[in-house]
Image: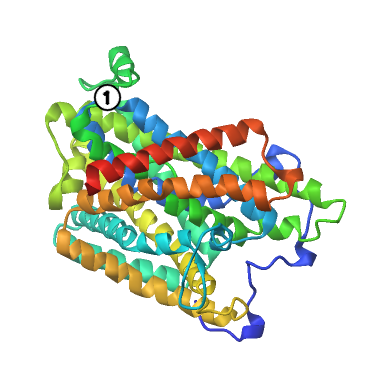
Amino acid sequence: MEDAPESDLVDPYTIRPGDARAAPTTAIGRLKYLGPSVIVSGSIVGSGEIILTSSLGAAVGFSLLWWVLLGCWSKSIVQAELGRYVVATGDTYLRALARLPGRIPGPRGPVAWPIWLGLLGFIPGVAGLGGIMGGAGQALTLLVPQISDTVGALVVCGVVTLLLAGGAYRRLENVMLTLVIAFTATTLVCAIAMQFTEFRLDTADLIAGLSFDFPIEYIVLAMAAYGYTGVNTGEVAAYTYWCVEKGYPSYIGAERDDAAWVGRARGWIRVLQMDVWVTLLILTCATLPFYFLGAGVLNPLGERPEGQATIASLSNMFTATLGPWAFWLFAIGAFSILFSSVVSAIGAGGRVVPDYLTVLGFLDRGRLADRYRWTRGYIIVVPFLGFLLYLGFQSPVVLVSIGALASAALAPIQSGATLWLQRRHMDSRVAPGVAARSLLAITFVFQVAMACLIIRFVIF
């Protein structure tokens, strides 16, 4: 991300009148404008699936299949409806949160309380990043045994920094597409192969998994798995920024009095909704196989992934179903998905942090060069912070669980804010229908209950 004259920089967060265009009306036409789903999937299908979902399956067997499905599917409505609000209004994610009632004194004036709460979530978020980075480092040692997991994590840290420091949206999108296809295909093949072994999934396992049993001794692990299964709070926020950089709000246009505005808005919201469905399809196809492999293979073997042997222990999911040769298949796939998670998470954070500083009053929204410098600074500094945390704990499961629990605890802020913002600050002509609002409200109530359970079982 090289410095450029201010006049040469283009602000993707300002709607430019000349960019307005009609949305495609066919499914094939909409497919050409998808992309945010691919980038955010690079983060979604990673640590939560290969580390937490597999570990949950290893611990409880098939009994929490229903919980994993709930984690996969319940948060996509928040992704879709917050995305609808952002592309229809032109607000960024943090500008939207800054509209919420309830002000707390800030360094440059009163700030909405969710802004401060989000800043408090930065530390557990970096802890989760450190866990993902450590997992990627452990996967790298499987491929190159001559290096240690800490050296592997440091290599991952350096490569990600170099990639993002000189990259742009399109390059990142292409990298994510390749990695997402690779790890999804690898996991599906292994799960299918499991059916031809002694570990095969049968009808009794499915019935047990959908019986709504909940082993209370694993409630903390289960809540952590919920926090990072599907789209977590950080990925929902990131998704809105990728939608803006893809151009959806500019394509809709800012002139709401224009007779064509409503038609364009509804058309591009349909494109966004298809993009969300693609995200849901990708994460489901990758999440369920990891849970099946954890429950069907690791649980009977008595394997419990932990510490510096986390990724090596998880490799049994592949070698027990495909044979010893699949060790290399797992190592490549594990490195790919965890590396893609690091790239996507840091790339998204580099967009969010300058917006935070703008909302807090430290940056002028119009000074693009300053925002680009903060983005570059973030993607240089934060990977090394994550690496240092892994160096201190050296347990991907613990670090990822910290980030996941914080994500689950903060989730009702997003769903509740989306309900309020759509009602108070969104053009009613493009607002969601009764079904979508009802589903969003149910999700909000459930996530409030989840946050209360986390406070009860984790903090107290």
Residue 453 appears left or right of 15: left
Q: How many marks?
A: 1
Is residue 356 visible in the rendered image? The answer is yes
Which three-letter amino acid code belongs to the residue tagged 1? Phe
Query: Does residue 119 lie above or below 291 as drawn?
Result: below
Identify the residue at the far top of this view: 204
Q: Position of residue 96 (x, y in %)?
A: 58, 58
Residue positioned 51% across, 42% down in the render: 279
Q: Position of residue 342 (x, y in %)?
A: 36, 58
Identify the residue at the far bottom of this view: 5
Residue positioned 78% across, 55% down in the render: 21
Residue 260 appears left or right of 2: right
Is residue 232 visible in the rendered image? The answer is no
Residue positioned 23% across, 46% down in the render: 458
Tell me the residue that label 1 is attached to. 62
Q: Position of residue 5 (x, y in %)?
A: 61, 86
Q: Position of residue 319 (x, y in %)?
A: 20, 35
Query: Does residue 266 lie above or below 173 as drawn?
Result: above
- Front-most of 201 and 350? 350
- Front-most of 10 and 367? 367
Q: How are the residues colored?
A: rainbow
Residue 37 appears left or right of 395: right
Residue 115 appears left or right of 407: right
